[in-house]
Image (tube, helix red, strand yellow):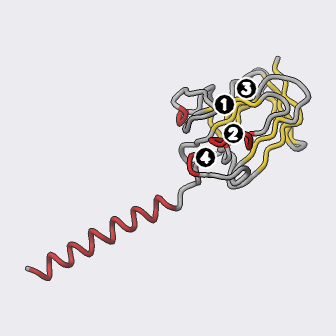
């Protein structure tokens, strides 16, 4: 009987350890990233145009999310909160905001066209889409205009 209790204790400990290790492998969140540019960065280098929405969270494994509000933000728009979304006006960088040192997503709004590092995303006639930023990727917004 004592041997059975020991085996059960070992099994429960192993299961808890496996659960903790599985969680540790998930993507880093901006809430725990403490230095500028330690994760994803969005630079709004556009000369003019609307602000670019960014988020410091991401849910799930998909690389895009169709919709105006990213579910993980709980509709919060704040430069000082995690999780939340914020917007960068032309000339601003996500690395200027501690809660966005590791930015996880950016949005191309409905009826807007964004050019980033030579790639154009055209959402004219279509709804908004959020794009996931992986690892320490940099997104340089060259132009952003809405119609």
Q: Left or right of 41: which side holds 77?
A: left
Rendered location of residue 8, percent (x, y): 20, 73
Q: Nearer the viewer, residue 143 or 85?
A: 85
Q: Left or right of 11: which side holds 136?
A: right
- Residue holding disc 4: 30
Q: Earlier in the sequence, mark 1 or mark 3?
A: 1
Camera-near label (2 vs 1) is 2
Count all numbered tags in the image, as a single digit.
4
State how far apart marks 2 and 1 are (Cα).
10 Å
Of the 4 image quadrants, the one containing the N terminus is bottom left
Image-quadrant location for residue 17: bottom left
Mark 4 neighbour class, 10 Å CA radius: few under 14, some 14 to 19, many 20 or more: many
- Residue holding disc 3: 109
In contact (CB < 8 Å): disc 1 and disc 3: no
Q: Earlier in the sequence, mark 2 or mark 1?
A: 1
Residue in the picture at 74% in, 44% down: 95
Mark 3 neighbour class, 10 Å CA radius: few under 14, some 14 to 19, many 20 or more: many
Camera-near label (4 vs 2) is 2
Q: Earlier in the sequence, mark 2 or mark 3?
A: 2
- Residue holding disc 2: 97
Q: Earlier in the sequence, mark 4 or mark 2?
A: 4
In contact (CB < 8 Å): disc 1 and disc 4: no
Mark 1 neighbour class, 10 Å CA radius: few under 14, some 14 to 19, many 20 or more: many
Camera-near label (1 vs 3) is 1
State how far apart marks 1 and 3 are (Cα).
14 Å
What kind of element bears circle 2? loop
- Residue holding disc 1: 86
């Amino acid at each position: 009987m004592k041997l059975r209790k020991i085996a059960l204790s070992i099994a429960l400990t192993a299961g808890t350890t496996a659960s903790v290790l599985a969680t540790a492998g998930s993507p880093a969140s901006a809430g725990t990233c403490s230095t500028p540019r330690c994760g994803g960065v969005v630079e709004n280098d556009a000369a003019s145009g609307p602000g670019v929405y960014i988020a410091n969270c991401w849910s799930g494994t998909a690389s895009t999310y169709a919709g105006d509000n990213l579910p993980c933000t709980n509709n919060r728009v704040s430069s000082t909160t995690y999780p939340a979304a914020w917007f960068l006006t032309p000339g601003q960088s996500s690395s200027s905001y501690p809660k966005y040192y590791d930015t996880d997503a950016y949005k191309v709004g409905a009826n807007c066209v964004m050019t980033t590092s030579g790639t154009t995303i055209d959402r004219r006639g279509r709804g908004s889409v959020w794009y996931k930023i992986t690892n320490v990727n940099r997104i340089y917004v060259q132009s952003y205009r809405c119609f």
